[in-house]
Image (cartoon, rainbow, N blue to C red):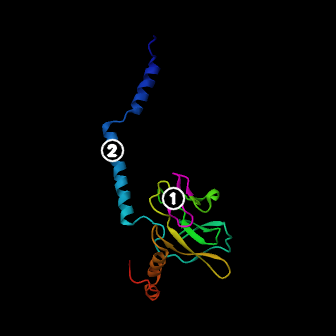
Amino acid sequence: MSRPTPEEEALVDRISADSLTSRRDYLRIVATVSGGLAVGSTLVSAGVLHRHGDGTAAPLKVADRLARGEAVTFDYPGEDDRAMAVRLADGTLVGYSTVCTHLACGVLRRDDHAEREGLYCPCHEGVFDVRTGEVTSGPPPRPLPKVLMVEDEQGAVWAVGTARSGESEEAGLCRGLRERSPALAARAGCGGSR
């Protein structure tokens, strides 16, 4: 076997030096990642980071008409809140956030299972019932937050409020009304803070 040339030895030394991670470097990386996770989880638990449906939002017209079996996507209640309205085959109008409750991937409508499993998260195979927003399979831990939809006399479809994951539509409407006008909320029978 021949001896390596000085250039080959220099290359081996350089590669070895580049791939070394000292114990100190490793601990620095672990401490940085751990610190980032601690700060992030503190911000989430303290409510500093945005949560779908927080705050007040004015009603938003999302479609002039929505025929049976059709869906439309829109941003509500804020410009960073992706949502979808769906007119079911029986004429029922439903709306949901399209941000998966598992890891915030985008939720899509599945035409191949339009009624029973019409909402699908392709990231981790999460499936939501299009009629209720409830999880039917996969890893999502909670139902989709609701976007409260109404139709006016001309058939236009409007988003008028939100209900958080697991919150009833009435509670969501009352929460939004209390934030905008506590006196009007009291007259509507919403009561005090819940």
Which quadrant is home to the N terminus? top left
Range of residues picked out in magenta: 120-136
Callout 2, which amino acid?
Arg
Residue on which disc 2 sits = 28
Please indicate whether residue 117 sits to the left or right of residue 10 in the image.
right
Q: Nearer the viewer, mark 1 or mark 2?
A: 1
Picture coordinates of residue 99, whole percent (x, y): 52, 61
- Answer whether residue 77 is visible to the viewer in this image: no
Picture coordinates of residue 153, whole percent (x, y): 66, 82
Image point 63% across, 80% down: which residue? 152
Q: Quadrant of residue 130?
A: bottom right
Residue on which disc 1 sits = 136
- Answer whether residue 10 is visible to the viewer in this image: yes
Which quadrant is home to the C terminus? bottom left
Q: Is residue 159 magenta?
A: no
Between 20 and 97, the one lying in front of the other is 97
Element on which disc 1 rests = strand
Disc 2: CA contacts within 10 A as few (<14), some (14-19) or many (>=20): few
Element on which disc 2 rests = helix
Image point 38% across, 79% down: which residue? 193
Between 182 and 66, the one lying in front of the other is 66
Q: Is residue 124 magenta?
A: yes
Picture coordinates of residue 49, whole percent (x, y): 42, 64
Callout 1, which amino acid?
Thr
Image point 67% across, 69% down: which residue? 68
Disc 1: CA contacts within 10 A as few (<14), some (14-19) or many (>=20): some
Contact (CB < 8 A) between labels 1 and 2? no
Please indicate whether residue 15 sits to the left or right of residue 85 in the image.
left
- Looking at the image, is 180 positioned above or below residue 92? below
- Looking at the image, is 84 positioned above or below residue 191? above
